[in-house]
Image (spheres, rainbow, N blue to C red):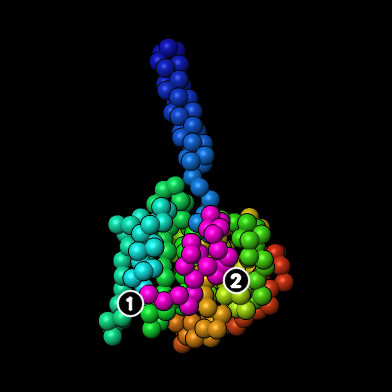
Amino acid sequence: MKEFCKTIAWIVLSIVVAAGALTGLNKILQKPSVILTSTQCDPTCWYGIHPGQEEPYAIYTALSKIKEVNPDSLIIENDRDDRISDIHWNFQRPAPDGTGAIYFNDDRVTAISITTVNSIRLGELFDKLGEPERYWTEIGQREYGEYARIYLFYPAKGYLADVLIDFEPGATQVEIRRSTPVFRVTYFDPDLFQDLLETRILIDEPAKTRRGSFVPWSGFGMLPIEN
């Protein structure tokens, strides 16, 4: 019986060590978010693609050549007039991000959105973009509770970052830190800011049913929420 227990303990230890090694290897092989690895041009440009750019099919071809983009996942969506409304895709390893989308109006890029899926922290993003001007809070529901979706806006620069923060029932505040994971980053044409607010490209809640208002950003710490 004693030898049997030793054998079981050795097996368990081996599994734990192997799992730890695989986790460590994954961290070594995994690259930073594509928001950080896009260095050939400055935001709002991403991997050579920028708001205001035309020729959607040329952009589609450019996307297929970005090694972090899964070319088999690229999908073109058309509007009622059979013009391209958006191109979306999945990222592939070693990029840690989830999905991306480019939105068009009259064949011109209006916004580029990257679902980072918590692959970048707010502190890292602020080091690259600076701090936002204002924010908007939206309350959402999950199976296990409520969360605050906080949209951090840079209207004059054309940047948006949003984060998801779970909170307990009855909470009136949530805390936002440098270590808070970023859910999504969007670059957009600042001249189209008001027009884009009327869509669901920047804020997911439809414009007609939104509650609340913009609040000036005052830094990390506790932010009030209306539940």
Tell me the quarter of the picture where residue 88 sits.
bottom left
In the image, what residue occupies the spot 31% across and 73% down? Answer: 77
Label 2 sits on a secondary structure element that is: strand
Q: Quadrant of residue 225?
A: bottom right
User: Which residue is disc 2 drawn over?
Assistant: 152
Give, as a three-letter code, the residue at label 1.
Answer: Ile
Which of the pair 63/134 is nearer the observer?
63
Q: Which mark is residue 154?
A: none
Q: Is residue 200 visible?
A: no
Indicate the position of residue 107 as horizontal and vertical percent values. Answer: 38, 80
User: Residue shown at 41%/48% (left/top)?
Assistant: 93
Position of 103 compared to 202: left or right?
A: left
- The residue at the point 52 percent across, 75 percent down is 188
Q: Amino acid at mark 2?
A: Leu
First to last magenta residue range: 36-55
Q: Residue 121: percent from the left, percent from the top?
A: 59, 56
